[in-house]
Amino acid sequence: MNGSRFAKQTQRERTCSLVHGSWKRAGARLACVGACALMVGQLLLPSVALAADWINVGGTQYNGGVAVGDEAGTWSWNGADDMQLNGYNGGGISAEGNLNIGVTNTNTVTADAGQSAIEVSGGNLSITGDGTLNATGQTDVITAAGNGITGGDVTVDGATVNVTATGTDANGEECENAEAITAFGGDVTIKNGATVDVKAGRAAGSGDGYYGYVTGIYATNGAPGEDGEFAWEHDGQSNKGGRVSIGSGSTVTVKAESTLESQGIVSRVNNAAARVEIAGDSLVTAIADASNGMWGAVGIEAAGMGNDATADIIIDGKNTFVTAIASASKDRYSKDTYGLHTSSGSAVEGGSIQIKNGSVVAEGNDGAIVADNYTTANGPAGMIVIGEGGKVVLPVNGVVRDYQKLGARPMALGNRFEYADFWGQTIGEPGEGVLRADRDADKIAKVAHIAFDGGAMPTPDPAPTPKPQPGGEGSTGTTGVPSRASAQTGSAVNVKLAAAKASVTASKTTTSALAATGDSAALTVAAMGIAGATVAAAGIAAARRREE
């Protein structure tokens, strides 16, 4: 992958994937964020934590240094970096500098048109407490913007947060984007048993129909610079930020719907390391629905641009359950709809999807699970690594296969050019050679389920009698040994998955047939059936954790 892939284009010139198009939109978002941010412009050391200089509550601004609040006690601010909400029901909250919001009982923040419900500029935002925060707005509903050196982090620590990005105002007027939680020049972190529910879109098409970009959770290292202009670097160095981390038994549910392009959970960077990490026995469901859209969708994605960008998705934890579903129109222009997707742009590292433990269900019209790197034929490929004890349960006998998607774009290598493509791995039918996205689409799994021996799996009651599978009861698939990256691929381990078989056998035959067709609606039903059983088990596991 090289920078030219992300050159700014008019909307009508967009012919690339989600990875390509989102950068132009990010610039537009940050221009708006930068204008609102009024950033001071000093280059602060990352270790320096600044209290908020001011705070705005429901349209009234209060300067720092003096504690304030309302008479009813629904909100209070200590004049520095601590704000408490207790039964608040009102307009948007914004601040410049670091702000921690503690929530008690149920609180509702509703943004005016064109505004965020909660916005921090030049600092970090943290939402804590044992209460509930409901936030609604058009776009960038909960957001923080740093300067690329400090600030920009959004953290939900233990709290319950419900976010709705409508994409329209009360009069039905559309804005370009509908994005729920966004971090510019920072990371999104959800931890310590937090519960986050996100609904984004549907942003209705308007004008020439090139509107309706919808994202649930989005982190990027792009941020407003000193001049307020969107930038990915400072003083020749890449900005910090752009990662999403979910852990410590947290529950995250994202549903993004769009008439154009939809994304669930996204980490996107320029010349840095994109990463989505889900661990600590967390339950994550990301559904991106662009079934009426013309571009595409992605459930969970980590992607980088530039010649020094890597991307990784890492899933770990015995009781971690991840569901990533993406659906798009059969008539879509792009063929980039994936459940789990990483896309790197590095001549050194190809990036990876690492499923170390847990249970993963993924679905996408163009591939359930795809890891790729934009490089030449001799460059490093993206990898899918399945940890020891892991098994591709669906498709039946599925394996990790080498993958190529044609890029048809020359890459400068010194004084010469070579054509670069997207090289990596996917889940597909057993076989030799490389699966090419255009030629071998029917061999690439559109629905995939990966489980681990000994992990918490759903057990139906009563348990159905498993139907005979191809190869007999003892038959097993493998994770494959890709020819271009065999030294780094996870072990292919034959395991007995009695509980997994009981939970998914009834879906296997139907889902395997659908995987070859790419039928969006039917695929989603099949994948959600598997995910539903998985989520049921996750609920049991979560309940047990609470009882301990």
Image (cartoon, rainbow, N blue to C red):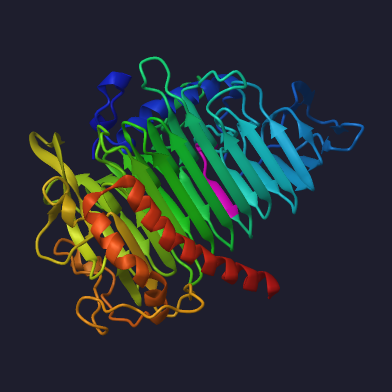
- On screen, residue 525 versus residue 282, left or right, reads left
Residue occupying the far bottom of the picture: 474
- The residue positioned 26% from the left and 62% from the top of the image is 512
- The residue positioned 56% from the left and 19% from the top of the image is 35
Residue occupying the far right of the picture: 71
Q: Name the image quarter holding the N terminus.
A: top left
Residue occupying the far top of the picture: 207
- On screen, residue 207 versus residue 111, left or right, reads left
Q: Position of residue 401 (x, y in %)?
A: 19, 61
- On screen, residue 222 versus residue 483, left or right, reads right
Q: Position of residue 192 (x, y in %)?
A: 63, 59
Q: Name the image quarter holding the C terminus.
A: bottom right
Taking depth in this image into account, of 269 and 294 the one nearest to the observer is 294
Magenta stretch? Answer: 181-190
User: From what the image shows, is residue 335 above or below residue 477?
Assistant: above
- The residue positioned 66% from the left and 44% from the top of the image is 126
Main secondary structure of the magenta stretch: strand
In the rendered structure, does residue 494 fall within the stretch colored magenta?
no
In the rendered structure, does residue 189 fall within the stretch colored magenta?
yes
Q: Does residue 310 appear anywhere in the picture? A: no
Q: Does residue 416 appear anywhere in the picture? A: yes
The quadrant in which residue 296 appears is top left
Taking depth in this image into account, of 67 and 256 the one nearest to the observer is 256
Q: Position of residue 404 (x, y in %)?
A: 16, 50
